[in-house]
Amino acid sequence: MGNSKRGLVDIEIGGELHQVRFTLGAMRELEEHFKVKSLAAVFANAREWGTTDYLFVVAAGLKRGSMPDATPEKIEDLVTIAELAPVVDTLTKALRASATGSTVKPEASKDIRPTSGAPAPQMPSA
């Protein structure tokens, strides 16, 4: 489960529950990648990113979250086109949580499997 005080936000990647976090190191990486001094406009135009951009942002967030060895190459086949919009929305929320400490949790899916060390998502009782 994410820890909003640390900027950790739950995200479903490849059918597994992970956490993303945007630290200053992640922000620096993204500013260098996008060749900008501020990421606000970059995230506002996320629907215009290329595939490489999406992979880079996801990897930067996962690397500071629950997958320290994340790289664009390691995650490129974990996210499908259909999952892209929810992933981008969660990344935007994670960026906000890193800055404000707000709590953000994705809707639980019956197919989500938690990563090692992460608790299983709570499913509503029937």
Image (cartoon, helix red, strand yellow):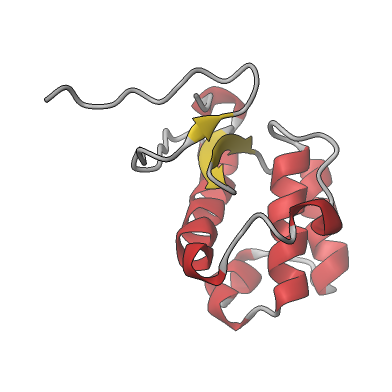
Name the residue rendered at 28%, 26% in the picture. 123
Name the residue rendered at 65%, 39% in the picture. 21
Quadrant of the image containing the C terminus: top left
Q: Is residue 59 left or right of residue 117?
A: right
Name the spot of residue 85 as percent of width and height, x first: 47, 67
Name the residue rendered at 42%, 40% in the picture. 111
Q: Is residue 126 left or right of residue 54?
A: left
Name the spot of residue 93 as percent of width and height, x first: 49, 50
Eyeballing the image, is 120 above or below 58? above
Q: Is residue 20 left or right of residue 101?
A: right
Answer whether residue 124 is visible to the viewer in this image: yes
Q: Is residue 36 left or right of residue 84?
A: right
Extreme residue in the front direction? 111
Extreme residue in the bottom direction? 48
Eyeballing the image, is 44 above or below 67? below
Answer whether residue 23 is visible to the viewer in this image: no
Q: Nearer the viewer, residue 111 or 63?
A: 111
Image-quadrant location for residue 29: bottom right
Q: Nearer the viewer, residue 120 or 67?
A: 120
Name the residue rendered at 57%, 65% in the picture. 80
Eyeballing the image, is 23 above or below 82? above
Name the spot of residue 36 as percent of width and height, x first: 80, 72
Image-quadrant location for residue 110: top left
Image-quadrant location for residue 107: top left
Name the spot of residue 59 as percent of width and height, x first: 76, 51
